Each structure stands twice: as C-alpha cells, then as structure tokens.
Image (cartoon, helix red, strand yellow):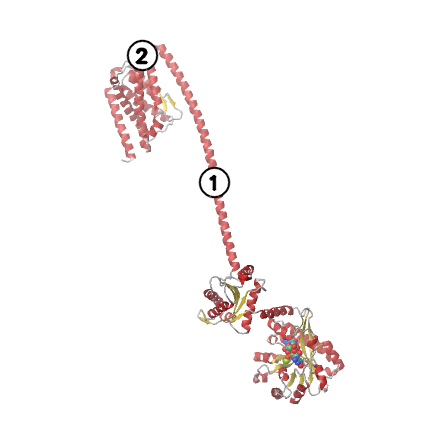
Amino acid sequence: MNQEKLFTAFVYGITITGLISICYALVFLETEGLNGSSIFLIIGALLITSRLTLSLPRSNSHLSFSDTMIFFAFVFFTGELAILLAVLEISVGCFFLKTKGVVFERHALMFNVFSVATGTGATLLVWKSLPFLGLSNDYMSTSNLVTSLGILALAQFAFISSLASSYYALKRGQGFWSTWKREGFSISMTQIAGAGLAGIAYKLISYGDVLTIFISLTILGVAYLNYKQLFRDINESIEQAEQAEREKTEIARAKAEEVEEHARQLRSLLEKEEEISRDLRQSKQDLEYAAFHDNLTDLPNRAYLIERLNLLLQLGPDVARRYYVLFLDLSRFKNINDSLGHTIGDEVLRVVALRLRRCLRDEDTIARLGGDEFAIILNDLSSINEAKSYAFRIYDHLTQPYVIQGNKIFSDLYIGIAPFDHEQLKPEDILRDADIAMHSAKEENNSVAVFDKQTRSKYLEYIRLEGDLRYAIEKNELALHYQPLISLKGGELIGFEGLLRWFHSELGFVSPGLFIPISEDNGSIIPLTKWVLREACSQLQQWREISDEHDDLVISVNISGRHLADKSLIYDVQEALDETGLPARCLKLEITESTAMENAERTIETLNEVSNLGVKLSIDDFGTGYSSLSYLHRLPFDTLKIDRSFVLNVGENGEDSGILQTIVSLTKNLKKEVVAEGIETEKQLSLLRDLGCDYGQGYLFSKPLPSSEMETLLYQKKAWLPDPDPASESDRLPSEISEIPHRYA
Ligand code: C2E
Ligand code: MG
Ligand code: MG
C-alpha cells in the first residue's frame, strides 16, 4: 500500500474510532450528574478556556486551558463528559484559531476533532482501569488526585501526541519518531499544565470557600496574564531574533547571490575574452599562413623559402652541405597564358605544384617564387648526384603533357641546382646561385645544370654592368669614337663609323662586345642609340663645316635588332637629323645581316621607311648571317659591309679570297656598294683592291678615335692610305685598345 493510501486509511480509521468514542460518550453519559453548575461549567469552559490560549515559544502549539477542563471533567464529573467536552472544546478552539488567521492543513481540522475524541476515548479506558491499579476515586486525597491526574495527563499526552505525530508522519512521508520529537513532544507541556490546573481547581471547588475560590481565581488570572505577557515577550524577542536571523540570512543570501552574479559575469567575460583571443589566434594563424603561402598553389612562398634557407645557413656549413637548392623555370609558360588564357595557365601551375609534391618527399620544401618559377630545398642528400637524379625525376614528371579542359598542353622546363657553400652569406645568395645554374641550363639548352663558381662571377659581372649601364649617360661615362671609311681606289675619306665606348668610373674601359649585348637584353640599347645618333649627327655636321670636301661625308651608326623592331626608331632618327641639321643622306644606319634576316618582312618595311627619309642603309657583318638572296634583293640597302673574319682569313697566298670575290661580285650585280672591314695589312688592302672592293675600314687606316683626335687629323688633311714602305706596317697596328685599361677590353 502506498503512503497516500495509508494516510487516507489512517484518517478514516481515526474518524471511525473518534465517532465510536463520541457515540459511546453520548450513550453512556450519566445525565444525573449534570446540574446547572456543571452545564455552566461546560459553557464557561467552552467560551472562556478555549479562548485563553498561550502560544508556546518556538512551537506551533498553543497552550490552551481546555486540557484543564477535560481533566477536571474526568475527576469532577465523568469520562464520557470529558470526551464530549474535549470534542466541543477542540471544535470551538479550532474555530477561534482559524478566525485568528491560523491556517490548518487539509484534513487537519476534522482529524483534530476525531483524534481528540479517539485520544480522550483511549484515556477513558485508562481512567476506567485505574481502580485495577489500586487507585480509588477518592480525590480528596491529594496523592490519589495527583497520581490519577498524572496518569491521565501521561495517557492523554501519549495518545494525542502519537495520533498527531502519526498524522504528520504519514502525510509528509517522514519517520514517526522524528516527527513525534518535533511535533508531539511539545504537547506534553499542555497536558501536564492542564492536569496541574485541574487538580488545583478540583481542590478549590471541593473546599467550597467562595473567598478562597475568588482569591485563587484572581491569582490564577494574574498569573495567566503575566505568563501571557511573558510568553508574548519571549515570542516577540524570539520573533525579533528570528527576524534578525532571517535578515542576516537574507543579507548573506543576497551577498552570495551578488558574488555568484559577479562570478557569472566574470565567467562570461573570461569566456568572451577567451573567444576573442581564440579568434585572434585563429586570424593570426590565418594571416601567418597567408603571409607564407602562395594562394594559387597553396605551396609555401618566397618568404617561407627565405626563412627556411636562413635557418639552414644558421645551422652552419656541416649541416647545410647535405642540402641542395633547385631553381625551376617553366619555359613556354607565357605562351600557354597568351594562347589559352590565364585560367588554364593557373590550372597548369596548380598541376605543376601537385606533381612536384608527388615526386618529392615530405621533408623537401617546395615553394612557388612567383610566375612560373619554383624553388625546392632537397633535404639530407649524400651527393650532388642524388640531387641530380631528383632533378631529372622532376623534369620527367613536369614535362608529361597536361590535359586541362580538353587541351593537351606541353611544357618544358629548366632546372638549376646549387649546393650550399661558404660564399653564400644570405638566403638570396644560394637562391641566386640556383637561378644562375638554371640560366646556364637555359643557355646551353640542357634540362638540368649544376651551379659552378665561374658562372657566378660572369653573372655577377653581368648584373653589375647592367645596373651601372643605366647611369652611364648621366655619369658622362660614354663617348663615341670614330673610325674612318676610305675609298680603296683613291684613298679619300668617305665617312666614319661611330663606335660607342664606355669608360666605367671604377672598372675602366668596358668593351662594347660586353656591354652592347647586356643593353640589348635589358632594352637600354634604345636610349643609348638615341644618344649615339644625336652625338654622331652633331659631330659630322661640325666636321662638314671644316671643308667643302667634307660635304658628302657619311656617318654610320650601328642599330640593334631590338631598336629595329621598335616603332621609336624612325622618330629617333628624324629627331637626331632635325636637331643637328645633318642632311639625311649623310647618315647611314648599319644593321647586321643576322638582325636583318631575323624578321625579314618587318625589317624590309622599317628599312623602307628609313630609306624614305633619305637615310642610307648598310648590311653589317655580311657573310655571317645566312642571307636569303630573295630577301636581300628586296632589302632597300645601299652598302654591304663584308665581315672582318673574311678579310682576316685572307692569307699570304690569297686563300679564302674566293668568298670575298663572291661577295664583291654579288654586290656589284645588285648594284650596291661594298665595304670591307678589318683591313689590317697592306696585303689585305691590295687583294681587296684587286677584287674591286670600293671601300675599306680597318686599323691599317686608323683605329676608332675620339672626336678630338679625329678632328685634328681632319684639319691636318691626313693621307689615309698607308705609306708603301713595308717597314712602317707594324707601327700601324691597333693602338686604341692598348691605350685604355684592359680589364674589360
Ligand atoms: P661592328 O659594327 O662590326 O664594328 C666594327 C668593329 O670592328 C669595331 O669593334 C671596330 O673597332 C672593329 N675593327 C675595325 N677595324 C678593325 C681591324 O682592323 N681589326 C680588328 N681586329 N677590329 C677592327 P668595336 O668597336 O669593339 O665594336 C664591336 C661591335 O660593337 C660593333 O661591331 C658593333 O656591332 C657593336 N657596337 C659598337 N658601337 C655600337 C653602337 O653604337 N650601337 C650598336 N648597336 N652597336 C655598337
Ligand atoms: Mg658596324
Ligand atoms: Mg661589322
């Protein structure tokens, strides 16, 4: 049976026993004992005593005088009356308490009534068995009265407290004993006090002395009021103490709540801060990743590679010598971008990255330097041969065709390998060495090349000259030297070739054979030629004024292929003529045969434009450039200049003169003029004269000279043809180069 059912059964059980008890009392009530005074007593008891209650401190119980009346009824009247009195009194008492605001639990009111009836009924049974315990009903005997009332009080206390405790225990599901201690024990006070008062009342009434009764009642009244006041004070001070305690608890609770709230806020603040710092950490990581990675291929970038190389350099040569740096450059990648578009170009780069990852080990570092350039650090190898075999493996993987969006793309690449050495101080040094090796692979058209120190010094020299050349004009380091062109028949001066000279402020003389290709590579040849054109035209214009004989002199200026392909050439030529006032017919442009044949159609077009200005044209170094005769026929040139190698090879016995003969005949047939350059000996001169060559240029007549020296010779009206005395020939060997520092000659 569950607790709720047990409780209900208990309440019903007590109700039934209570009803039995009440019925019994009604049936067996001895009415003859009930006179006017006893009825007055009952009514007085009901009206007065039930209202005279004292609230017991620290308890829910109220000390009422009803128990006095009940015990009094036992000893003065009968037990049955006591039952009814108890029932009536509890009913009225509860009613008064309710009007005072006391709240009763559900069933509590009904249970109170029936449990009092049951309890008092049970006490009646004990009362009736008192004679069996040897106690007479002579209550004039004080000991008899005290003992009987004592037993009554204990019995009533035991029954009432047990019933009340059982009620609460069952209702609240608590243990009986703990409930009894808490709820039931305090009732003992009521019982004992009630029994005491009943005894006193019995004695007073039994003596029948009105004065005594009056004095006793007065004393009792005063005592009651005092007690009431005392209990009220006690209750009030307890209430105050409890209130203070409650307030203290409330303050403590509020404080605890406040602390808890602070703690909560702090927690959430910390959580937020943690979240922010997590976000910061994350974004820092993202930024770091982005700073060190290439976002197209997701490979490490140049910055990452530099860091890594730095680390290796710090570890020292013993560790670093087991590492090799590879520099990769995809050839024809620009073509892929130009012809198939950048999207496909990007995809090719991604696949390249993927293939590199596949054919290398995890510990190797692969980085994209930008564009189509990649660099790799190969870790922990035993020899350069191992590095080479990795390079060839990379070459094989990367030259497999790329199939992207239906396009089959072929790509070639060059790989340079650089080992670490003690001359590399910065990460850029080793990277530069690998780059140099890659360039030498490119120049020699090999897939893989290993760095060597000679290449490095050439490269460093190249870089230096390239840089310095940009400022050569500004720094006044350039000069134009003039080499005369002579009529081989009569020995008259017909003009000059302007040849550029660079006197480097630190390095001394730098040969045009060295710096002209560099300036062609980096494009600075165009501004340089502009300067040369202006210088040459202005100089000849001055010299033309020396004598009428100089009227038809022609100045030849060398034009590079790069300038020929540039639209600015015509403007530059026109500008030089306009600024100096030199007639167009006095200017001749020299274009090497190989340059002229490189893009023949375009060259024909440009040279026609130049020719239309009235400017003359010469094909330089003829015989070295594999001319197509059909193109040669269409080129609007005036002069062919035989390369000096053909002149040089003309020996004592006239060997190789066949080629010279052919070139001279060809020119005659084309109705052009022919010039031989590099004439150094009189034998060469006489042979060329015999072959019918019109003009000549060479050390035999004059080395290229600075303008001032040439001007002196012009004023002196120098005879250019050599003295026929053979002894003087060796004296005329070239002197220009020997006069200037030789380092770059
Ligand atoms: P180039 O146009 O064929 O010039 C003739 C070269 O032959 C010059 O060398 C000249 O000094 C040299 N030479 C002349 N006679 C003799 C000789 O009897 N024996 C020997 N051994 N050499 C002789 P240079 O001045 O060193 O010029 C070399 C090349 O540099 C020129 O060849 C030309 O292609 C280029 N160059 C020089 N100045 C310029 C310039 O202003 N513009 C351009 N684009 N190229 C220039
Ligand atoms: Mg020339
Ligand atoms: Mg030449």
For label 1, being within 8 Å of ligand 1 is answered: no
In this view, the residue in front, 686 or 133, is 686
- Say whether residue 694 is visible: no
Name of the residue lying farthest toward the left: 27
- How far apart marks 1 and 2 lie (CA) works out to 72 Å
- Within 10 Å of disc 2 (Cα), the crowding (few <14, some 14-19, many 20+) is few
Return the disc, 1 or 2, that comes first in the chain's sequence: 2
Quick check: 716 left or right of 293? right
> Could you tell me which secondary element the residue under label 1 belongs to?
helix
Q: Quadrant of the C terminus?
A: bottom right
x and y, in percent, of residue 382 in the image: 50, 65
Query: At label 1, which amino acid type do we have?
Result: Glu
- Say whether residue 461 is visible: yes
x and y, in percent, of residue 126 in the image: 27, 21
Residue hosting label 2: 206
The circle on residue 261 is 1
Name of the residue lying farthest toward the right: 716
Q: Quadrant of the N terminus?
A: top left
In this view, the residue in front, 557 or 324, is 324
In this view, the residue in front, 584 or 468, is 468
Query: At label 2, which amino acid type do we have?
Result: Ser
x and y, in percent, of residue 53 in the image: 37, 22
Q: How many marks?
A: 2
x and y, in percent, of residue 390 in the image: 48, 67
Q: Quadrant of ligand 3?
A: bottom right
Name of the residue lying farthest toward the bottom: 690
Residue drawn 27% across the image and 23% down it: 122
Q: Is residue 22 above or below residue 561?
A: above
Q: In the rendered image, which quarter is residue 667 located in?
A: bottom right
Quick check: 732 left or right of 562? right
Q: Which marked residue is nearer to the observer: mark 1 or mark 2?
A: 1
